[in-house]
Amino acid sequence: MATIPFIVSVFFYVLVTSSVLDILLLAITKVLFYCLEEEIKWIDKESEILNALWRDVDGVNPEAKVAGLTLQLNEVEQKWLKSTSDLFQDATNCVGRYKNLREGRYVVILHKIKPIINLVREMKRIKTAIQSHLEGKKKDSIDIFKRLERSRSKIGSLKERRGHIDGYPPVRKSEVITSLTRKAEILSTRENLICGMDSEIQSVKLLIIVQAFLKDLHMLQLESETEKVWVKQAKEIIREAESAIENFTGGRPNQVRWLSTFCNWSARHKFKMEMKHIQTKLIKLLDRKDRYDFKFIYTDASKFLLGRLPLTLQDTNINLKDISIAVSRLSTRLSNVPLTRKKVIDEIKPLCDQLKRINELLNDAADELLFYSRKLWLQQVSNIVQIAAGSIELEAYMREARPKHLMVIKPMQRTIFLLERILTVCQIEQKESRSVVCLEEDVQEVVLQLTRGSETRLVSIMGMQGIGKTTLAKEVYNHRTILQRFPIRAWVNIDAVRKRFQLIKNGVPNQIRNFWIDKLRNHLASGDHLLVLDKISSTSDWDMLREVLDKSLSSSRRSRILLTTRYYSKFIHAGNNLVYGCHYVQLQTEEQSWKLYEQMLTLRSKRVDKSKEKLIKKDVGRCGGLPCSIVSLADQNPEAAERWCQSAWLENLDQNFTVSTPVNRSSPQSRILNEENSFLLRYLSYSRLFPGNFEITARRLVALWVAEGLVYVDNPNRIINKYVVGDNHLNRLIKRNMIQVVKRKLDGKVKTCRLPGVVGELIMRYKDIHPQYNIDLNVPTLNRLVDNYDNNDESFEHIHGVDTNSPEVWREYRRLVSFISTDTREGNKPGEDIHSFHKRGIANKCFGELKVLDLERVFRPQLPKSIGKLIGLTYLSLRWTYIEEIPSSIGNLCNLETLDLKHTHVRNLPITVWKMKCLQHLYLEKIYRIVFLYEPNTTGSLNNLQTLWGAFLDESSPFLKKKHFLAIRYQLNSLTKLGLTFQLEQVKQKDLAKWLANLQKLQYLRLTSINHGGKPQALRLEPLSRLQNLYSLHLCGDMENISFFFPKSLTDLTLSATSLKNDPMQDLQSLQKLRSLCLYSDSFMGESIVCSVSGFPQLKFLKIANLKALKEWDIQEDAMPSLWELEIRSCHLLEVPSGLKHLKRLHELKLSDMPGKFTTTIRENTHLIWRSLHNPPVVTILF
């Protein structure tokens, strides 16, 4: 029995001993796991980034193949990427083992010792492997992220240009934790807790900056998995900080005093430790982004920001210049410290160096994108500078170095170091959108419509299939101004959700349907929303959407809808009950088409074969300016390009010129549409008279429309310029993508245009393709004859063939209304053929009803002497014919309204021409100085004259005789376009000036004053400020002063040989509407010009040439904010203007005949001059 107590004692001894051992082992294991936690988290975070990189590569490759591209990785990069995958697997297994061991039961603790030891070894191996892996990336210059970004950019551009944009996920309010700022404010009020915790408070402020950066990133469309993982890790750190602050500031009610003191001390200690760990994690997060060297990229469609952003430097109440001045003062004070105080210098200098670097980072940061974080950067740096200048009491410290100041400086240096790291890492890089080539102005116009004013609630982007509507909408959707103006955005592809629309409309009970409609209405009315509705193709789609959105937009003054549609009639229907705006995407010009083709080749790493360039340009021209067709051609698929053209334009004809089910035929909208279509059909079919892809000037085409009576004025009682009406109709055809603009003038107006060849072919067979519409687009050619020098034409033999006098042949031409020739062959044959044809026709009593005779660009077509018999003629154009004389019988053309002799060699006009009562437009060649022999009288001759261009006045002109001066005031007062060259004494010029100053209808004015040798002489004019319709002015001649001289309506101004002594910019920059300015040879004789702040607000084109004395050009900030193109030519003394950097919207800088030093400086420093722009202007140097 005695042994029983002994056994029991032994048992209890063993039990107690084993329990103590287990408890000890358990404690050691927990401590060990706690120590390993940071290491395993580091491995987990690094492996997460590596896996994201692998997924990025894996995701880009399939898309690249679809787009016809490949992700080019060399052998070293492929090997590194394979190793990345293996490392991720090892790291994932290691993290899993750690979690299993830590979460498992501690029943048999000794069994876990060996696995734990193995785990520690494995963690060490993996960490070393990851570090070596990243060092190898740096050593071998592996930059997979750059290759990924390049490939992703190319793929995106190709997809967008092909119209493959399915949409974007909806952008909601930021998911970033926004309560950190509020909790930090609460923390700052707990003075009893935070006393002596300056370092921790600074850490919280730095985290708030990171949070603001995440808010900035929220407006970007993050494309790579790597970016998303880094953002996720940053959010986790912010959540930890928020939790730590919340626990620290939590209330502790009903505690006795000594317990409260102990709890405060414990909480402070715990908070310090937590913030220390969080700061360590933040440093690792920043290091991680540096190691992998990936960038947050914003692809921008525009060089400048439309409108003012809500968070700009002015909103911070902190001036960046003040910070720079404060930092400079600190450096100055430091430089004044005696060298004997070496300890002071050694302590303060690093702090000043840090602040200098911070200041440079702030100057270089892209403040347009860092809306929120930049504001906090400025506040933080300003606070630090104030502490450095004030709290440290720098002057006292310099006199007596006291240890307490060193205690202030060291934490401050640590804070500045971390702030510098944040400023360096938390950046958004800007890149120019590759898909927006030639769409820059379209983007700006749509953004303006969405953001300016409160009335326009709906904006429609319209255009034919394949023209780039969705691409344009995408660029607008991601535009900087839109990102800031509309924090909540959604993109809906109507084609993709049409079935769901039908289900909602027909398959859902009204009660449920109305509930969700009301919910959506309330949501849209609650804030600033942008809803993009892409590819609206039926009225039923819009009917249902309008029911939902109409009341919402009416109640919300700030929400907007942007829709895209191919169909003009749909948009007329769409805007019934909404205030709407519209933007038409036009066919690309010849220059734009070529740029797009070159860009598409560049995306495929190809170049244009110079030996085939002319042939390729011809093929690109046949695409008619349709982007998708050009892209197909760049894919080396001409068949696909032709199919695009055929299907797209056939659909465009259908939708533009037929009204079927979309609108009730009896509705007002339908009647308006049908009436407008009937007019446009008439003009479109007329264009088919010319050869396919024939380039014609807009001036000539509209003049022919007017001359043939195609331009209809609905109210004959109203005085309306038919040429203006014709221009409007041409612009409508351009907007509807039926006419392509080939070239534009500087002021944006159409210079030349053409009917795309494929459209002409479709018009010819349209009735056969769609007989159900009963619409014939073929123009009747019976009374019109166009000589295209085509031997397939019936008239070819009559004009260019064997001479025939057969009455049966000429009978066809007796009722001819118009004759137009496009025969531009070189040599005398074209002119001789035309002369023979007209001579024989008149002899056979033909052309009696002829109204239009257009021989533009036919070389020297001699007119028959019997031309005066064609008394019905209203339009005669001999422009660019170089004809030397015209028959005297031309004066008999009493009904002639337009006589165009510009670019001819005609030196004299019959005196009867000056007495034509019906003459409205007279164009002469100024080189040959055809004297203006008009003599005012009471018969009303030339009273209807609207255009007089190229006439010459001298002392012999009866026009300026004293006895006619009063009559002049009442005649020739209908002029809208006047171009005069005169050789007059100053006394005579005064009479001319009085007449000019009273031409109230004048729109274009060109005046040249010359001496007997043909050189410019004094030009004396009265102020033209009363001519409120004048918008284009060209002056050549010595002028004394231009102050208060010009009307505010001017949009285009050219000065040449004006010999101005004072800086003309000071007087011209107040012209608010000026878009184009040319200062040519000797227009200014001084050495310096200044473009002041806010001057030239609308100027887009500026040319400066042959200003021989000009040396300095001061371009101040915010001067010429809209300047698009700048040309400087032959200004040999001019130095490079330092203010070029302020021209932030400049697209192209042209330099011609400039000194080598000037051009070299510009060429080598382009990116430095415009370093604040992500896409500096193109610099073109001509010799």
Image (tube, grey):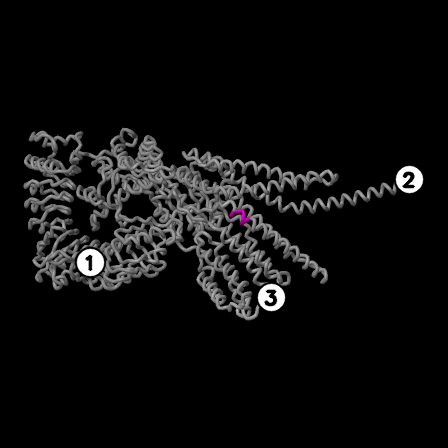
Q: Is residue 304 magenta?
A: no
Q: Is residue 612 left or right of residue 533?
A: left
In the rendered structure, which amino acid carries the disc numbered 2?
A: Ile
Which secondary structure lies at badge 2? helix
Give the Cα distance between marks 2 and 3.
Answer: 72 Å
Asked whether the residues under the numbered discs 2 and 1 touch, taking CB atoms below 8 Å apart as contact, a structural biologist would say no
Q: Quadrant of the N terminus?
A: top right
Image coordinates for residue 693, horizontal then vertical, percent:
24, 37
Which secondary structure lies at badge 1? loop
Q: Dot 2 surroundings within 10 Å: few (below 14), some, or many (20 or more)?
A: few
Q: Which residues are magenta?
A: 285-290
Which secondary structure lies at badge 3? helix
Q: Please report whichever mark, 2 or 3, sits nearer to the chain's N-terminal start.
A: 2
Image coordinates for residue 386, horizontal then vertical, percent:
52, 64
- Residue appearing at x 65%, y 40% in the figure: 119
Q: Is residue 555 visible?
A: no
> Which one is in front, 643 or 889?
643
In the rendered structure, which amino acid carries the disc numbered 3?
A: Pro
Q: Is residue 759 left or right of residue 390?
A: left
Q: Nearer the viewer, mark 3 or mark 1?
A: 3
Image coordinates for residue 1040, horizontal then vertical, percent:
20, 64
In the rendered structure, which amino acid carries the disc numbered 1?
A: Ala
Residue that badge 3 annotates: 403
Q: Please report whichever mark, 2 or 1, sits nearer to the chain's N-terminal start.
A: 2
Q: Please report whichever mark, 3 or 1, sits nearer to the chain's N-terminal start.
A: 3
Asked if 147 appears above or below 211 in the picture, the reply is above
Give the Cα distance between marks 2 and 1.
Answer: 129 Å
Residue that badge 2 annotates: 4
Asked whether the residues under the numbered discs 3 and 1 touch, taking CB atoms below 8 Å apart as contact, a structural biologist would say no
